[in-house]
Each structure stands twice: as structure tokens, then as C-alpha cells.
Amino acid sequence: MNLNLKMSLSPHIHSGNSVKKEMYGVIWALVPVWLVSIYFFGVDALRVTLISVLACLAFEWLIQKFLNKTESTLWDGSAGVTGILLAFNLPSNLPTWMIIVGAFVAIAIAKMSFGGLGQNPFNPALVARVFMLISFPVQMTSWPVPDALNFSMVDAQTGATALGIMKEGLKNGEPMSELMNHIPETFDMLLGRMGGSMGEVSALALILGGLFMWWRKIITWHIPVSIIATIALFTGILHALNPGQYATPSFHILAGGALLGAIFMATDMVTSPMSKKGMLVFGIGIGLITVIIRVFGAYPEGISFAILIMNAFVPLINKYLKPNRFGKEVKNG
Amino acid sequence: MSSFATHTLKTFSIGGIHPPENKWSAGQKIVTLPIPKQVSIPVIQHIGAPSKVLVNKGDVVKVGQLLAESSGFVSANVHASVSGKVSKIESAFDSSGYKRISVIIDVQGDEWLENIDLTDNLISNITLESAEIVKKINEMGIVGLGGATFPTHVKLSIPENKKAEYLIINAVECEPYLTSDHQLMMEKSDQIIVGTRILMKALKVNKAIIGIENNKPDAIELFSQKLSGPSDIEVVALKVQYPQGGEKQLIKSVLNREVPSGKLPIDVGCVVQNVGTAFAVYEAIQKNKPLIERVVCVSGHDLKNPSNFMVRMGTPVETLIEATGGVPEGTNLIINGGPMMGKSISRLDVPVTKGTSGILMFKQTVSNHNQYQACIRCAKCVSVCPMGLEPYYLMSLAQKNRFDEMEAAYPTDCIECGSCSYTCPSHRPLLDFIRLGKSEVNQIIRQRNQR
Ligand code: SF4
Ligand code: SF4
């Protein structure tokens, strides 16, 4: 027999894992959230996601083809993930052209200008969201109120998010007990019956997606759990000190983008720390900053800013919080 | 047979992976391979200095006769594995792809040195004293049979200021596919136990631990049964987790002791020996038999008969493969050793040596080390590294030739287990670059120490 043997270095086997599998895993995890958003926001949810994903893919393709002249990584799924995540951070009634601007910011500015996949320091979808929040403040903060199976093309009613209601109310000196009547019941928040961006409304769907990624080993528990635990602890202390002024931890966790941020945005591999210790510090930082912005800052929601701020600290965290090296601190016995 | 309850299983603390085990040759009785017509015995089959050839062309040798003599402390004797006439002493390829001085013997009959005991009688009584045992192990050319081939007498010679407390027998066999140690344990348990006691006597320790991965419940049961009651030898079932058989990982698993960075097992009072080595030690000490044959597992994709063979050193790899039904159509990679740490071989006429634990034939479609993508910073390599290193970072420094900075990231701690490359979704050849960095950093350290 004619043998044609390869010479290669060990290891000679591979897990079969690939960037594509990781990214498509994230996409699968996002499906429940997506279905819930379609249920509540109707055709508009489809439109926003589609435009966002297509625009992200188009910008990535154009830049790789004509500017960088590198091999196309279009189908590795990462641009698709950015597109979906961007869509989930937007109100479902946003005009199409604004979505395309957002996609441009995410892919061209936040990702490709740093050298593409793996090189960007900031989460692209969040960079785009914050850019849009500043550029289109009105459109970005008037949220359609979810209405099951809203397939009519008529403009839905719009309103503020639960966090927005809370912030406004407290500013106007309304008592907490009064405010609680205006915001959705905890159970409704769990399912997603509240105003908000497309992806943040249903806590259950988000948690389901998170568990799926954890089971597939795409993420570890460290970042989501440390963010949520920090938010719970911090707001719990505030609430215990002055229940009339500060909302309950469950409100803070379920309202707004805390879960979307903790499970899908902060866990973005590229822009989060490498060691377990680093991940915990990163998560605690995000939790603290989120609560500070929500409670003391000007914006009702703070998790996007919190994640971006902590993204900036990742190189530092990686430098100083190394994994536990075997044989470094010797504990014998 | 039921496996042992998972919660009682010991394991190491950081990292690790679980590749598919594919132990296709498990349970296959060890078959003694017929002696080939010619053998090629390299004078270096161990870590250390090459041995000095003692025979000449035309000499007639018997099985067990010394062919080449150890040339230093870290070196090992090499013996004739067959009887016959030395036809050539030449430079020939060994499985590593290098040419080595080798003694070529044309086989005639099968005549052994008279003092070698070829019977099956079990001799349990250990008459030799500690120093005599070490000396005889040295004479018999015993080296570590787990693949590292480090001369055994060196590991048994404890430096003055150190003390051994435990002998640990490595019966983990954590490499996928390989089954030679497992089968040896099933067939030679009594001899292995005596071999373990000989090693204990040599080390002057009164406690030994045999660590076995839980995917070999029959071996765990057999040894536990033979060693039941208050015993000097304890059997420990270990979680199936690669690299459970790494020396440092094994010590951590069975004793919860952590060998400090840059130190050796003896620094925490341990000496680790492979289970195959324990068997070879039994044969050397009790039967006067030098290390001239070993168990080799032959396995691979679509192979007709995955097998475990008892093979004389110097037998061409080809002979083993033919005995299993020939190289399967489409094979493009042949490995000497396991898939995680073994070396690919380029030709089939190379000999089986002391370090050949398995021959694997693969049809490989993935893991082309030249095609890889950008690091997506997923941290998987970091979380699987059993030494707690940062493979992605080491690779990026090595790629940029920043070896000075690399030293501070401890590439010298890397045990080359390959878990990082195995796991990386971007197929980055992390270990290839870490190896490069490791040798550069070692050179930097050496130069600094010289000054
Ligand atoms: S090969 Fe080295 S760096 Fe890679 S996982 Fe193993 S010990 Fe860690
Ligand atoms: S596993 Fe690969 S892609 Fe992930 S961090 Fe390590 S080198 Fe980068």
C-alpha cells in the first residue's frame, strides 16, 4: 500500500470545537428570547432582528472584501450574534435606517476597526446601543408596550420601561408604594409583560438561554452569577435601609436589561476576562456600577454603561488576576 | 461490572479534559508476537546519554546479553532481545525520525542467557537489599515504561537531603486508545504487586499507592481484592480526567500534595513509577530478566483487530501492524504513543523501543496545525490547563518572539499535555508555540546561570 503519512506534533486529536460551533451555540441560546419578542412585539420584532443581522453581515463582508482584503469570516456566526444582540437592545419600533446606522457602528467601528474578531476591546452591540442612545435619545427610550401577538402593522402604544417609571416617579417625589402600582407585577416581569427593548423583557427566556450556554460550556457561571448577586446584594442593602426610596432587589433584577446584560452581553468572550478570578471581579464591578447609575445617576438603566466601563478594565484585570498556577501557593496535607 | 461511585473518586484540582476514550483493544489478551527475522536495537532508547556499544559485527549473542553499556548516571544499559548474529552496527531511523546508532541482529533460534528464569513461578520473597536492588535495576536497563523512558535507577536514588515517604504506582493510563497497562494489570497482578514491594524496599518506604482511573473497574477490583485487609499498598480509584496520569496531577489526586513549581515529586516525598515499570522490575530482580520486551497496544480507526502484544525490542513497527490486519485504507497518521502526547512516525520500518506504549493508526480530517483562526479570547485554554497557565498568552508572546517576557508566564511549568490545543475552538496550535517558547526560555535561564 502506498502510505502517505503526515508528520504532526501532539496533540493529534481535537475536541471538534470551533468558533462556528461556539457562535451558533449562542444563536441557539438566543432563540427563546427571540420567540418571546416576536410574541410580544409582533412583526416589528422580526423586522428589527432581520435588518440588524443582515446589516451586520453586509458591513462585515464589505469591509473584509474591500478594505481589509482578508479572508471572509462571514459565516463563523460572530457577526450574526452581534446583529441579534444589537436588535435585542433596541425598541421594536425603531426606524429601519437607525438600525442600519447601529449595525455600522457595531461592525465597522467597534469591531473591524480594531482588527476584527477577537481584537475589539468593547462589546460591539453595546457600543452601538450607547451610540444610538446618545444620537437618537427620543426613539431609543420610547418603548412599545408589549401586547401579545401584535401582528397588526398599526403603531403600538409606547411608554416608558419599568425602570423609567421608577426613576421619573422618584424624581417627582412620588412614594414607592404608589409607584409599585404603576409597574408590572413580578410575575409579569418574569414572563416579559412589560415595556422594554426586544430582548430584555422575558426573564425566563433569558435564563433558559443562559442555562443552555452553560450546559454547552460556552460560558461559565462566574460572570452572570456575580453580576446578579452583586445587584441583589447592593439593592437589597439599599432597600433594607430605606424601602420608601429604593426598590426591591427582585425589581432591579427583573426590570430592564440586567439579565440580558449579565447573561448575553457581559459574557461576550472577546471582551471579558480570561481567569475565573478576573471574571468574578468583572461581574462584581458591573453589578456595582449598574446599581450606582440606576439609583444615583441620570439614566434609568445603567448596565450597558457598566459593561462598557468594565470592558475597559479587562486588560488590567487580565494582567493582575492570573489563574491559580499549580504549585505556586503550596498547600500540602 | 459496576464502576465505583463517582463522589468517592479522587482527582486533581485545576483544569483537565475528557476526550473520547476509544479503548478498542481493552480486554484483548496479551499475545506474544513471533520473533522477527531481524531486529534493530538503537543504543539510545531512554532519556540521557547514549550507551556505548560493546559488541562487534559478526558477534553471536544470546537473549539478555548486554549490547551497549550505560555511559553515565543518567543513561541505561541496552540488551539483546533476540539470539543470533550481529550483522551490522549502523545509523538507522528510530521512531522519533532521527538516525541512531543501532545494533542489527539477524535472528537465529531463541537462546537465552542461562541465569534468566523463564518459568511462570511467582517469586514473592525479596532477598536483595535496597542498594543492591537499585544497582540491579540499573544493570537490567530498566527505564520508565509510561513513555518518558527516564532511567528508573535515577529516580530510585534519593538525594542525601531528601526523603521518600510514598511510592506511587501510575496505573492511570489516561491517554485515549491505549490499553497496554490495563491488560498487563489484568494478567500480571501478582507480579506487579511484588514489583511494587521491590520498589518500596529500594526506596525504603512503607507505603505505596496504586492510582487507577475509574474506566478500569475490573483492574480496580482485582487489585483491591488482592490487597484487601491492612496493607502496605493502597488502591485508589481516580476520576477519568486527562491528564490524570501526569506525575504532578497524580500526586495531587492521591495525596493532595502539590509539587511546587520547578520542583520534583521527591520534594513532596513521592516517587512515581509506571505500572509497567513495576512489572519490569519484578522480572529483573526476581527472574534476572533485563528489559528486552514490553507490551505494545496497536489500535486505530477501522483497524481489523486492535490488539495488545508482547513484543521484543527492535521488532519493526510494520510487523505489529501486519499482525492486526495491516494499515487500514485511508490512514494518514501513525502515532507512537497516545494521541495526546505521542509522536507521529513517518515510516514503518522503525523499531519498537522501551518507550513504545502504543501504535495508533488514524484517519485524520481535523487538527491541521497550520490552519487556525484568530483567538476569540474564550478562555477555554486557560480553564483546561492543569498547570494553571495561560496558553493563549504564552502563544501570542512566542509568536512575537517576546521570550524575555514569556519567562514570567512560566512556560517551564507546562507539562505538554496538549489539553489547550485540544480544546481551542480556533484550532490554535498553542502547544507547538509553547514548546518553542519553553526551549527559548530554558536557554535564557541557562545563559543567565552561566554568567
Ligand atoms: S500543554 Fe502546557 S499549557 Fe497546554 S494545557 Fe497542558 S500544561 Fe497547560
Ligand atoms: S482556547 Fe483558543 S480561542 Fe480560546 S482563548 Fe485560548 S487560544 Fe484563544
Image (cartoon, grey):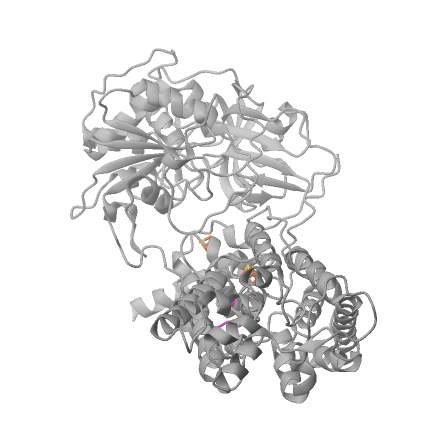
Q: Is residue A318 above or below residue B251?
A: below
Choose top left, top right, bottom left or bottom right for residue B220.
Answer: top left
Residue located farthest toward the left when viewing the structure as drawn: B161
Residue A93 x, y percent position in the rendering? 75, 76
Q: Nearer the viewer, residue A321 or B207?
A: A321
Choose top left, top right, bottom left or bottom right for residue B142.
Answer: top left
Q: Is residue B167 left or right of residue A180?
A: left
Identify the image quadrant of the C terminus of chain B.
bottom left
Q: Nearer the viewer, residue B15 or A302?
A: A302
Q: Is residue B379 visible?
A: yes
Residue located farthest toward the right when viewing the structure as drawn: A153
Q: Residue at point 50% right, 62% down?
A: A224
Q: Is residue B116 left or right of residue B106?
A: left
Residue B66 x, y percent position in the rendering? 38, 29
Q: Nearer the viewer, residue B58 or B183?
A: B183
Residue A29 x, y percent position in the rendering? 64, 56
Choose top left, top right, bottom left or bottom right for residue A118.
Answer: bottom right
Query: Residues in magenta?
Result: B398-403
